[in-house]
Every structure is written in C-alpha cells, then in structure tokens.
Image (cartoon, rainbow, N blue to C red):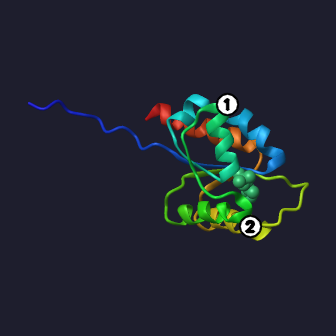
Amino acid sequence: MTPSTTPSPPRPRIALIAHDKKKDDMISLAGEYLDFLKGCTLSATGTTGGRLANELGLEVERKQSGPVGGDLQIGAQLVDGGIDCVIFLRDPMTPQPHEPDINALVRACDVHDVACATNVSTARLVLSQLMAARSQS
Ligand SMILES: O=C(CO)COP(=O)(O)O
C-alpha cells in the first residue's frame, strides 16, 4: 500500500520592490520576516533583488531595474497570475523618471485585486497575515 501524502500548500509568490531611499527599510523588513520569506517564491526589481540576495541570502528572481522596465516586468508576471502579493516601498518624496511604470504596476494590482503594500506598516500587516495563513495550512 502506498502511504498517503498530504500535498504541501503552495508557496506564496511575493514581489519585493523598493525605491532607493526605501531600500534599507526593505532589508530591515525582509530581515524581520526572513524565515517566512525563505519559504516563499520571490520576485524583485534588479537592485532591490540584488540587495535581498547579497545581504539576506534570499533566493530571488531578479527582473530588470525599475527605471529600465523592472516594474513593468513584475506587472506582466502579476497579470499572468504569477504574483499573490506586492510589497512596493515607494518613495513619496522623490520624483521618479519611470513614474508611469510605477503607476501601471499599482494599477495592475487594483485591476487584478492583488494585495499591494506601499509602506512598511501595511507590509507588516500583509506579511503577518500571509504567515499566519501558511502556518494554519
Ligand atoms: O525603481 C524601482 C521601482 O520603481 C526599483 O528598482 P530597483 O530595485 O532596480 O532599484
């Protein structure tokens, strides 16, 4: 008789993006949730992803850097159903050359009803909820 196996729950697929002045916040935040994030499938824009990999040892699919299309690549992945949650630490005090791309990504989250946290407090709520849901499954 073959032993019955319980299928493991799907890994949450999370996109992590931070503008330059918010990258230290992203590293601190990801450090707080490191064990949980290690069990997730992560995508990130280029520079953010590089820091998450180098400084925290996270395995991350790195897209292009934001200003050269990385936000749009994350958006396309999301539209194709490949992202469950976006953590996007935006810098509201610095104009960005790729503002239309940023707006397109946030809009895609709203169109497809994908959770999008744009500041650390909201990100903590979302990550804590995902973590609790995963530990119950
Ligand atoms: O500009 C960004 C998001 O709009 C972030 O891109 P980087 O992670 O490559 O810095």
Residue most toward the left? 1
Label 1 crowding class (10 Å Cα cut-off): few <14, some 14-19, many 20+? some
Q: Residue at x 84, y 52 (%)?
A: 91
Q: Position of residue 8 (x, y in %)?
A: 36, 37
Residue closer to the observer: 67 or 40: 67
For residue 117, say whether it is visible. Answer: no
Quadrant of residue 2 in the image?
top left
Which quadrant would residue 124 be assigned to in this image? top right
- Residue 28 location, x and y as percent? 74, 33
| Residue holding disc 2 | 103
Task: Please tell me in which quadrant of the rendered image residue 50 appears.
Answer: top right
Up-down: is 127 above or below 100?
above
What's the mark number on residue 121? none
- Residue 32 at what x, y percent from top left? 68, 29
Q: Considering the numbered disc 2 on the image, is that residue within a helix, a strand or a loop?
A: helix
Cα–Cα gap, marks 1 and 2: 27 Å
Residue 22, placed above or below residue 67: above
Type of the residue with mark 1 = Gly
Residue 119, x across and y down, in percent: 77, 46
The residue drawn where x is 58% and y is 65% is 112
Query: According to the image, label 1 marks what residue?
Result: 31
Q: Quadrant of the C terminus?
A: top left
